[in-house]
Image (tube, rainbow, N blue to C red):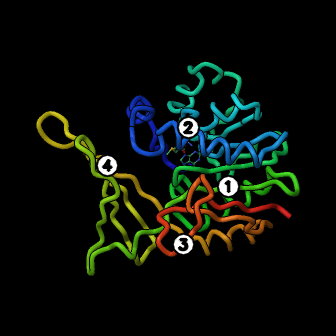
Amino acid sequence: MPEDLFGEDVAARYDDSGGEHFEPAVIEATVDFLAKLAGDGPALELGIGTGRIALPLSQRGVRVSGIDLSEAMVARLGAKPGGDQLEVTIGDFATTRVEGAFMLAYLVFNTINNLTTQGEQVACFENAAAHLEPGGCFVIEVGVPKLQRLPPGQSFVPFDVRDDYVGIDEYDVLNQGLISHHLWPADGGWQRRSIPFRYVWPAELDLMARIAGMRLRERWAGWEREPFTAESRRHVSVWEKA
Ligand SMILES: C[S@@+](CC[C@H](N)C(=O)[O-])C[C@H]1O[C@@H](n2cnc3c(N)ncnc32)[C@H](O)[C@@H]1O
């Protein structure tokens, strides 16, 4: 089982993290997109967390189940109104099976990168596909690796700078590794939390999907179906199970 990086200290702050992903308009666009794909069928969120997306999606009438490693994140979901109606399994979303056949599986907010080896990422696609009905879709939202924005010879690139928070990505280009450093002011200095990821290109994800018996159906730069271009900083991709 991978290490749980979302323990009580992180879960306690998660919903107040701020940033674009917590803006109501972004959540609404995400839920719109996913609800259309789910149709009348059930949905499975890999890395369901505190229910940022799963709860509003279930309020739209979609039956949502989830998998997550973190007891602390899931406890927060369970404490929210309607949270106890969702079926959540504690486990690794690369390998954990839950009951049911789904029309939609989704993995948002860069969480595919939490799997730090290619083998685990492939296993995750295979696991998602195993949960889908034929014609069902797997959706991933993830950043495009920022290698074009790395200064020559450097491995650090900031991704978010606010008055009370600085986020910096550190790239290990040789090993396709990435560490996100989160810094915030505390006790007259800075506190830091560093999380390891594996960055992955869209084309590599398409190959993982193919290995798992799925084909790319759509790729956008965001939840509003913005065109995906060479400048896009992230993508929302939809693969369909044969
Ligand atoms: C960035 S949070 C996203 C939570 C939620 N999906 C959202 O969009 O707000 C990542 C979540 O994925 C979970 N996670 C990370 N790696 C996991 C793994 N291998 N198996 C299951 N859950 C995992 C974490 O515990 C955490 O709840």
What separation in Å lies between label 3 and label 2 (alpha carbons)?
A: 30 Å
Q: Which one is earlier in the sequence, the residue at label 2 or at label 1?
A: 2
Task: Please tell me which residue is depicted at 54% across the width and 52% down the height of the picture.
Answer: 111
Can you say whether 174 is above or below 236 in the image? below
Which element is circle 3 on? loop
* Residue 182: assigned label: 4
Q: Is mark 2 within 8 Å of ligand 1?
A: yes
Dot in front, 3 or 2: 3
Tell me the distance, in whole angstroms, between the alpha carbons under discs 2 and 4: 19 Å
Q: CA distance from mark 4 to mark 3?
A: 28 Å
Determine whether the residue tagged by mark 1 lies in a helix, strand or loop. Answer: strand
- Ligand 1 is found in the corner quadrant, namely top right
Which class describes the residues within 10 Å of circle 4: few (<14), some (14-19), or many (20+)?
some
Residue kind at label 2, given as amino acid type: Gly
Mark 2, Cα crowd under 10 Å, few <14 / some 14-19 / many 20+, is many
Q: Amino acid at mark 1?
A: Val
Task: For the residues labelled 1 and 4, say whether their Cβ atoms are less than 8 Å apart.
Answer: no
Decide: is 156 above or below 192: below
Res 229 label:
3
Q: Earlier in the sequence, mark 4 or mark 3?
A: 4
